[in-house]
Amino acid sequence: MPDDESIETARDRIADHRARSAFEADVDSDPALANLPFAQLWFAPGVAEVGLFTDDDRVVMVAVDVNDLGHRLRTGPLSGRPLDISDTVAAAPTLGLPENEAAQLLARIEQSLRIGITAYSLATAEYDAEERRLTQNMNVLTDGLERIQRNNNTHVTLAYEDPLTFGGGHFVLYPSGNTRSRFTIEEQYTGTDWSDPDRLPTSWAWRAERHLPNTEGTNPWRVSARGEVQSDDVAVLLTKAAAWARRTRDIAVRSETLKQNPPSRGPLEPPHL
């Protein structure tokens, strides 16, 4: 039975949709079931239930549990009151069928429900595997960016920002001591958005930017390079971030060297005539 207080997750929605599609496809493929008035179809891990309405406003609920043989039945009027626990003998008159035909019909409905349960289970397994893959790639990115900062710790700073309210991305590399340039990484999602607490990025958009003055006297961010990489290509993104960090470090080292050892101009010579 569905729980009115349960909170449906994206995982549940995907699995339920897959299970319903499998159930409906199996029902539609069988002329004995295709035109029956089914309703109240429900799936959860390892269990399923569907109602079969009759012409006299009664219902036979068929429930299946993968851990049990056969199915369970409940019958009663469509009045909202609790249905009575039943069996094939009692359900047959409600369905208006002889007992043997009712048994065959209910067994066939059970089969369709079990097909839906299998689809539900496969969908959750695929979702969980995808979640593990995306989580692993996310951890690889985070660890890699932190390693880049450690390797360039005096010249590059890693910031975690919110691109919806401020900042250039979810991860941003800046030159230490100034914000005239940056390397931004923004998470991209499929089928969800930033408001989902269970979100995981399926790709990342990156930009290399610099503050450049314009004729209006402001210094907007100008993009010098950009791209997007899929989750499994996280190593490509880290390579680009590391290259940006090395260039930033090299520029800072050259600047520091010039400050400490400015080039000698030597004595001025008179102009040659």
Image (cartoon, rainbow, N blue to C red):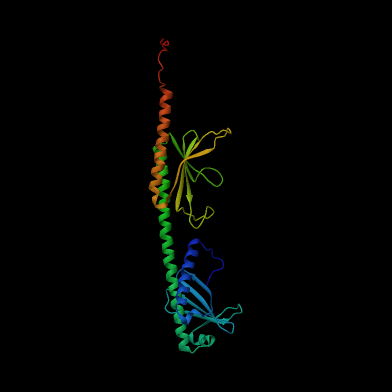
Q: How many marks?
A: 0
- Residue 75's x, y, as percent? 54, 82
Residue 224 screen position, x and y as percent: 46, 39
Q: Would you place residue 33 above or below residue 133 in this image?
A: below
- The answer to whether residue 101 of the structure is visible from this angle is yes
Up-down relation of residue 52 to residue 222 (above or below): below
Closer to us: 136 or 165? 165
Q: Residue at x 46, y 87 (%)?
A: 101
Between 175 and 180, the one lying in front of the other is 180
Q: Is residue 54 left or right of residue 15?
A: right
Residue 156, quarter of the rendered image:
top left
Q: Of all residues shown, which one is farthest toward the bottom?
A: 98
On screen, residue 10 above or below 182: below
Residue 103: percent from left, percent from top: 46, 85
Is residue 65 among the parts visible in the rendering? no
Residue 123 to residue 212: above or below: below
Q: Quadrant of the C terminus?
A: top left
Return the x and y of residue 138 as percentages of the image width and height.
Answer: 43, 50
Residue at x 48%, y 49% (from the top left corner): 187
Q: Residue at x 41, y 42 (%)?
A: 241
Q: Residue furthest right?
A: 79
- Please tell me which residue lies in front, 122 or 244: 244
